[in-house]
Amino acid sequence: MKKSLLLFMVVALGGSILTTRADDTYKIDPVHSSISFKVRHFFSNVRGSFKKFEGTINVDTDHPEKSSVTATIQTESVDTSNDKRDQDLRSADFFDATKFPTITFKSKSVKQTGTEAGDIVGDLTMHGVTKEITLHAKFLGKGKGMGGHAISGWEATSDPIKRSEFGLTWGKTIEGTAVVGEDVQVTIEIEADKAP
């Protein structure tokens, strides 16, 4: 799924975007952020999210390619607004949250693709498997928050993530139609507070 992945999951993309000093650090504010996903269920999409996660964004405006992001998601916090489905997702058929309590994302590279956009390549570790994914990120702005401290806003999406590549292989078909789809789309909305 955040970040990564979250995941996940966003970094500063260049001096033209942020006028902060190099090596600023921001902490993801989970109260004002979300990590969500959607996957096919027969002929429609089911959406879900993770309610517990944390992460750090390190911004290097002098060398944006050296910026980085790390994030950790608590697997058991998955929420699709249906208790039975959530129990199934936490079970060994899917996430196996008891054995694999976290999902992590750690960036490896940042490439600016526009004035306020960039691609973040990093390792997503889920269900005991680590694979490289790409997040397409956009910077939304920065300024003072309610408490007077600096905050920043971001959003990111993943390319479709194939769940079977992470060992989430449960599958069933009815009259040739898959009950659960293979591709998972991740959407990340982040508000991050500048660390003191």
Image (cartoon, rainbow, N blue to C red):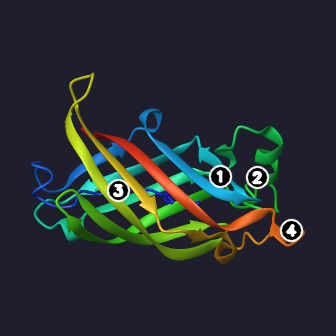
**Element at label 4:** loop
Q: Residue at x 85, y 73 (%)?
A: 176
The percent coordinates of residue 189 (x first, y second) are 42, 45
**Mark 2–mark 1 CB contact (< 8 Å):** yes
Q: Quadrant of the C terminus?
A: top left
Q: Quadrant of the N terminus?
A: bottom right
Disc nearest the viewer among 2 and 4: 4
First in residue order: circle 3 vs circle 2: 3
First in residue order: circle 4 vs circle 3: 3
Dot 1: within a 10 Å radius of its alpha carbon, few (fewer than 14), some, or many (20 or more) residues?
A: many
* Position of 102 relative to 191 (above/below): below
In space, the residues marked 4 and 3 are separated at their CA atoms by 35 Å
In space, the residues marked 2 and 4 are separated at their CA atoms by 18 Å
First in residue order: circle 2 vs circle 4: 2
Q: Which residue is mark 2?
A: 90
**Element at label 2:** helix
> Amino acid under label 2?
Arg
Q: Which residue is mark 3?
A: 10
In space, the residues marked 3 and 1 are separated at their CA atoms by 20 Å
Between 156 and 18, the residue placed more toward the observer is 156
Q: Which residue is mark 1?
A: 75
